[in-house]
Image (tube, rainbow, N blue to C red):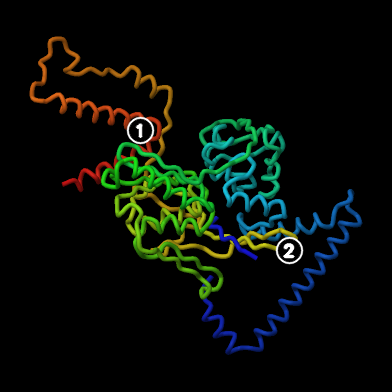
């Protein structure tokens, strides 16, 4: 059975020494522990039988057992859970890159469902959902007290059907409703475009297709630019990327490193930890990089950002990431069901765990929200120059070709200014690469 590892203990030697030296009390303790376990299992059986016989309504034994298993797993941490056969099938669809739903990655906090990130170009994204939103009601019914799986199940439904989600958002005085039409979510894991001389690689998730799509898109942009010499660097945009497959996070990072550690994982038994190293070959031949992150960048995104930051391969820009530093293993169980279990923590090359801390950017840049006042100031901005004055002297020191080149450069700067208004963080990242290119120019 295939295990899927998602990027979504100490003191062993002392324990062995003590057990070896004082064997009898340890065995006695183990016997006592087993006795307690058997007593608790007997208690579970008594409660199970009493519910089946005396609960006000008839219940299925299968549903009771599945609920007990899910409760046991979800009590461990927010990311461990039981996957019914249907849930396991949907999870496998997600890792392949196509599934049905709203297009939001969620976790649970304070009893409510918290949006980790809306995925690009999905119904939730287009409806205006944002990372950090709290979902309090689904179609008017409160999600308080539900497990995360139960809340997610409430949000599922036929493609084309409507759902109304009540949202609490920081900065908004009152909760508000968001209406979303469910759709088939087809994930394009990686997109590439060119802004000026900078290639922008936007990764939305880490599924089976991410690395291949990223490299293919990069190569196409470089070819259209006339070669790598005409590129000043790459912006790797990981904002609102909720993570995914650990293997893909490793491959994406490896694409930009020549050598060195990418990530290590450590579970309960240190001897069973893994260490993953880069292989030779950098797809952009050492060109400068900027990695963009924010509070919606989680798990596999943080592995990539943390590794490139530790190796000083990239400048990390944006805001602090989500802080999910644990690894889940999806273990197939009988009857096509599965168990998602937190099995280890991951560590960046410098040995830091980002669990609950996140990756801190080298340069903190908040995303500016454009207001009506900003728009009015732009429209009313007094913009005149010497060239606008009647009877001004001409510039006879420049040829027609030189004037045309200046005008082209000015048009490029004006286009960059528009990007700054539309996506301030991205414009900031591109400006960093422009500056580095200017310093390295001969």
Q: Quadrant of the N terminus?
A: bottom right
Instruction: Identify the residue at image location x=67%, y=60%.
Output: 339
Comparing 88 with 352, the one in front is 88
- Give percent across and percent down for residue 271: 51, 75
**How many numbered markers are drawn?**
2
Report helix, strand or loop for mark 1.
helix
Q: Residues within 10 Å of mark 1 (few under 14, many from 20)?
A: some
Question: Residue 396, relative to residue 110: is it above or below?
Answer: above
Report helix, strand or loop for mark 2.
helix
- Give percent across and percent down for residue 12: 53, 78
Position of 148 compared to 217: left or right? right
Which of the 4 image quarters holds residue 75?
bottom right
- Give percent across and percent down for residue 201: 41, 45
Which of the 4 image quarters holds residue 237?
top left
Q: Is residue 296 visible?
A: no
Instruction: Identify the residue at image location x=64%, y=60%.
Output: 76
Q: Is residue 283 visible?
A: yes
Q: Residues within 10 Å of mark 2 (few under 14, many from 20)?
A: few
Comparing 61 with 387, the one in front is 387
Mark 2 / mark 1, whichever is N-terminal: 2
User: What numbered label is drawn on residue 138?
Assistant: none
- Give percent across and percent down for residue 123: 59, 35
Q: Residue furthest right?
A: 53
Q: Are marks 2 and 1 in contact (CB under 8 Å)?
A: no
Q: Residue furthest left?
A: 397
Position of 283 compared to 382: left or right? right
Residue that label 2 marks: 334
Residue that label 1 marks: 420
């Amino acid at each position: 059975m295939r295990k899927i590892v998602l990027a979504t203990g100490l003191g062993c030697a002392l324990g062995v020494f003590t057990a070896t030296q004082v064997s009898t009390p340890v065995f006695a303790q183990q016997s006592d522990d087993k006795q307690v376990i058997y007593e608790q299992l007997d208690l579970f059986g008594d409660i199970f039988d009493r519910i089946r016989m005396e609960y006000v309504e008839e219940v299925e034994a299968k549903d009771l057992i599945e609920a007990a298993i899910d409760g046991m797993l979800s009590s461990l941490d927010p990311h461990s859970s039981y996957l019914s056969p249907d849930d396991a099938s949907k999870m496998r669809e997600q890792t392949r890159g196509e599934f049905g739903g709203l297009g939001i990655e969620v976790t649970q906090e304070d009893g409510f469902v918290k949006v980790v990130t809306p995925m690009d170009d999905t119904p939730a994204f287009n409806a205006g959902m944002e990372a950090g939103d709290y979902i309090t009601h689904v179609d008017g019914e409160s999600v308080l007290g539900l497990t995360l799986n139960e809340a997610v199940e409430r949000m599922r439904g036929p493609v084309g059907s409507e759902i109304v989600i009540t949202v609490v958002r920081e900065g908004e005085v009152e909760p508000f409703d968001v209406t979303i039409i469910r759709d088939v979510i087809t994930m394009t894991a990686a997109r590439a475009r060119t802004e000026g001389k900078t290639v922008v690689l936007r990764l939305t998730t880490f599924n089976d297709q991410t690395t291949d799509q990223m490299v293919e898109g990069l190569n196409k942009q470089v070819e259209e630019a006339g070669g790598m010499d005409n590129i000043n660097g790459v912006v790797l945009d990981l904002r609102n990327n909720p993570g995914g497959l650990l293997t893909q996070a490793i491959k994406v990072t490896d694409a930009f490193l020549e050598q060195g550690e990418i990530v290590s994982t450590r579970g309960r038994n240190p001897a069973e930890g893994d260490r993953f190293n880069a292989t030779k070959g950098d797809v952009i031949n050492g060109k400068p990089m900027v990695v963009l992150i924010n509070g919606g960048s989680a798990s596999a995104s943080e592995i990539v950002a943390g590794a490139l930051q530790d190796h000083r391969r990239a400048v990390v820009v944006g805001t602090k990431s989500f802080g999910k530093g644990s690894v889940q293993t999806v273990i197939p169980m009988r009857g096509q069901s599965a168990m998602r279990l937190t099995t280890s923590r991951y560590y960046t090359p410098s040995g830091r765990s980002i669990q609950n801390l996140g990756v801190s950017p080298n340069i903190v840049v908040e995303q500016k929200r454009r207001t009506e006042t900003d728009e009015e100031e732009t429209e009313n901005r007094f913009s005149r120059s010497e060239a606008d004055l009647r009877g001004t002297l001409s510039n006879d020191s420049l040829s027609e070709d030189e004037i045309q080149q200046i005008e082209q450069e000015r048009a490029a700067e004006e286009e960059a200014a528009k990007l700054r208004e539309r996506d301030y963080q991205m414009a900031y990242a591109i400006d960093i690469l422009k500056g580095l290119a200017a310093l390295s120019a001969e």
